[in-house]
Image (tube, grey):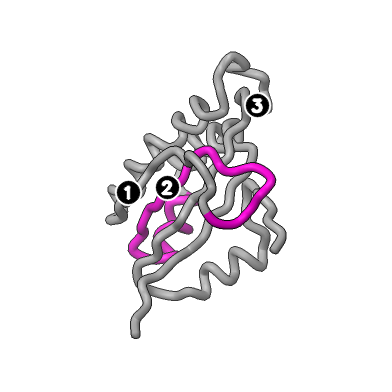
Amino acid sequence: MDMKNAIEPDEAQLNAFMALGEGPVSMLNLLRFRKTAAYPDGRDADLSGREAYFRYAVPMTKLVLDAGGTLDFTGDVKALLIGEVEETWDMAAMMTYPSPKTLAEISLTPEFQDIAVHRKAGLEGQLLIPCRVPTS
């Protein structure tokens, strides 16, 4: 199995996510940070990728909570117990949204648009995995 960290979903991934329909969806975030932030305009070149990302993560968490979602878990990745990858991630987080539509709506808000630059500046890449509790 090949793994490819990315920053944005492609069209097929976005369509598959939206096709999940109604109901809560938990998003497993596996995050890899840049050593130093990379803003397009060159600002804050002394920030670490983690510091830049948290300029996004803190207000994003508020947007999710205000929309009825939850922050279920966040922690630094310390090791890989089973399997093998070239590099492990720096952090894992799980957030639950009321529905895929909720996440899509948040991403269109002016508040999200204002903070998204910090996410891109801080991340080298990530895996974002939608999860649902089995119904049967």
Gap in angstroms between the C-alphas marked 2 and 1: 8 Å
Q: Under tag 2, what secondary structure?
A: strand
Mark closer to the chain start, 3 or 2:
3
Helix, strand or loop at label 1? It is strand
Look at the numbered discs 3 and 2 and tell me whether their residues touch, using CB distance below 8 Å. Answer: no
Residue at x-position 56% and y-position 42%: 89
Which disc number belongs to residue 71? 1
Name, please, the residue furthest toward the front.
81
Three-letter amino acid code at disc 3? Ala
Residue 27 x/y as whole percent: 44, 57
Q: Mark 2 is on which residue type?
A: Ala
Position of residue 106 relative to residue 110, above or below, is below
Q: Secondary structure at mark 3?
A: loop
**What mark, if any, has residue 2 been given in the picture?**
none
- The crowd level at tag 3 (other Cα within 10 Å; few <14, some 14-19, many 20+) is many
Image position, residue 70 (x, y; %): 30, 52
- Residue drawn at 48 percent across, 39 percent down: 78
- Gap between marks 1 and 3 measured at Cα: 26 Å
Assess disc 1: are there few (<14), some (14-19) or many (≥20) residues with their C-alpha within 10 Å of its C-alpha.
some
Is residue 40 or residue 129 the one in the foreground? 129
Task: Return the residue at label 3.
Answer: 38
Q: Which amino acid, mark 1?
A: Leu
Q: Are marks 2 and 1 in contact (CB under 8 Å)?
A: yes
Camera-nearest residue between 23 and 75: 75
Up-down: is 83 above or below 135?
above
Q: Which numbered mark, 2 or 1, is in the foreground of this view? A: 2
Q: Reading the chain from its start, which is encountered first: label 2 or label 1?
A: 1
Q: Which residues are magenta?
A: 82-108
Q: Which residue is mark 2?
A: 93
Q: Nearer the viewer, mark 3 or mark 2?
A: 2
> Which sits in the foreground, 6 or 68?
6
Q: Which residue is painted at 68% across and 27% down in the image?
A: 40
